[in-house]
Image (cartoon, grey):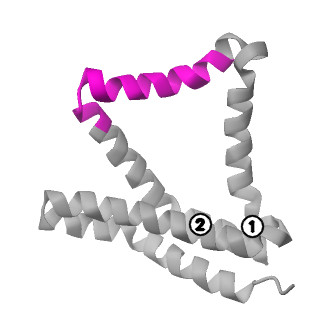
Amino acid sequence: MVYPSYLLCVFLMIPAFALTALIVVMMLLGAGPRDGWSVIIDFFAFFGAGIAEPLRYGWRILALLAAIAFFLTAGAIPQLRTLAFWGLGVMGSVCAAFCLYAAIRQGPNETLNAVLVLVPSFGGIGACAWFAAKFAVKL
């Protein structure tokens, strides 16, 4: 029952993660070609080198895939169970706070829209805290 609970929390956090990624990309694109676009291009070039020369830079793609796999499966490891829930809750809280900060800077209508989009993530943050307490590993 623990792993489906973790996946539920991950699913509820998707709006916070997606909105944060969208805001960061928009801010980088708005910064212009010298400051913002080059960061995006360098990010893709860092992993693209693994496609062009897999024997030399293939570890970059493997490390990215391993990080994604660890993020999705951390709730299934009994020793990491509590840490995974707390970590997911903290990560969702930071993303939601960043989104709300960016929305508050724009105005009240954007803040209300951001709050409405982030409602599932707020529920996910609460669920992470509750599941962390419920499924805590006693040593």
Q: Which mark is residue 75?
A: 1
Circle 1 residues within 10 Å: few <14, some 14–19, many ≥20: many
Residue visible at 74% across and 67% down? 75
Place residue 74 in its image quadrant: bottom right
- Residue 61: x, y in percent? 69, 29
Q: Could you say whether the residue bearing mark 1 is in a helix, strand or loop?
A: helix
Q: Are marks 1 and 2 in contact (CB under 8 Å)?
A: yes
Residue 29 in the magenta stretch? The answer is yes
- Tell me if 108 is positioned left or right of 21 in this view: left
Amino acid type of the residue tagged 2 in the rendering = Leu
Q: Could you say whether the residue bearing mark 2 is in a helix, strand or loop?
A: helix
Residue visible at 44% across and 60% down? 15
Q: Determine the residue located farthest toward the top in the rendered image.
A: 52
Magenta residue span: 28-50
33 or 6, nearer to the observer? 33
- Residue 21: x, y in percent? 42, 47
Quadrant housing the N terminus? bottom right
Residue visible at 49% across and 65% down? 92
Examine the rendered structure and indicate whether residue 33 appears above or below residue 112. above
Q: Main secondary structure of the magenta part?
A: helix
Q: Which mark is residue 133?
A: none
Amino acid type of the residue tagged 1 in the rendering = Gly
Examine the rendered structure and indicate whether residue 27 appears above or below residue 102. above
- Residue 84: x, y in percent? 69, 68
Circle 2 residues within 10 Å: few <14, some 14–19, many ≥20: many
- Residue 112: x, y in percent? 22, 70
Examine the rendered structure and indicate whether residue 84 appears above or below residue 68. below
- Tell me if 97 is positioned left or right of 75 in this view: left
Which residue position is annotated with label 2? 88
Residue visible at 83% across and 87% down? 138
Q: Return the disc, 1 or 2, that comes first in the chain's sequence.
A: 1
